[in-house]
Amino acid sequence: MKSATAGVIWDQDQVLIAKRRKDQYWEFPGGKIEPGESAQECLIREIREELSISIRIEEYLARIQGRFRGRDMDLHAFHAVWVAGDLDLSVHTEVRRINPLELPQYRFIHEDREIVKIIKP
């Protein structure tokens, strides 16, 4: 089973969502946990690599397990806050900061739809 992270980068009245190249769906950025790496370390590293920003993890939101895109996945979601840096996209084609009440209007990848269900604006 693959383990991964997702960061709900949320401060004040905006949450950050991203769309990858060749994908029609939105996601909360994150990535695969490397051997010997904690979920928190993974999320901080992935956000720095993918978006060129620094985050501070505020709290653990959820663990979502299931079969996504043909593979078993163990996804750890965290609430995080953007603390420094300017966006520079490496794997995404678009990033938006939206009001959390708007989340249901976007098409998310399957595992992130579960995160949308638990976010309470």
Image (cartoon, rainbow, N blue to C red):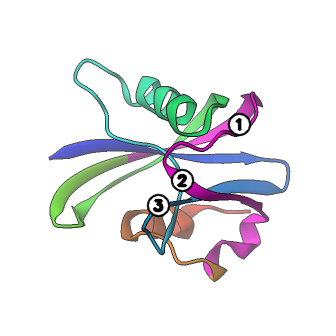
Q: Earlier in the sequence, mark 1 or mark 3?
A: 3
From mark 1 to mark 2, how far is it between C-alphas? 19 Å
Location of the C terminus (image quadrant): bottom right
Question: Dot 1, crowdedness within 10 Å: few (<14), some or many (≥20)?
Answer: some
Give the vertical position of 13 relative to 99 (above or below): above
Q: Which residues are magenta?
A: 76-104
Q: SS at mark 3?
A: loop
Q: According to the image, label 2 marks what residue?
A: 92
List x then y, in percent, for residue 48.
Answer: 56, 29
Q: Position of residue 90 (x, y in %)?
A: 53, 42
N-term mark: 2 or 3: 3
**Residue 21 tag number:** 3
- Residue 16 location in percent, x, y? 68, 53
Instruction: Kindly check if marks 2 and 3 are in contact, taking CB atoms under 8 A apart as contact.
Output: yes
Label 2 to label 3: alpha-carbon separation: 6 Å
Compared with residue 23, is residue 48 higher up or lower down, i.e. above or below?
Answer: above
**Image quadrant of residue 55?**
top right
| Disc 2 residue type (three-letter) | His
Q: Which mark is residue 81?
A: 1
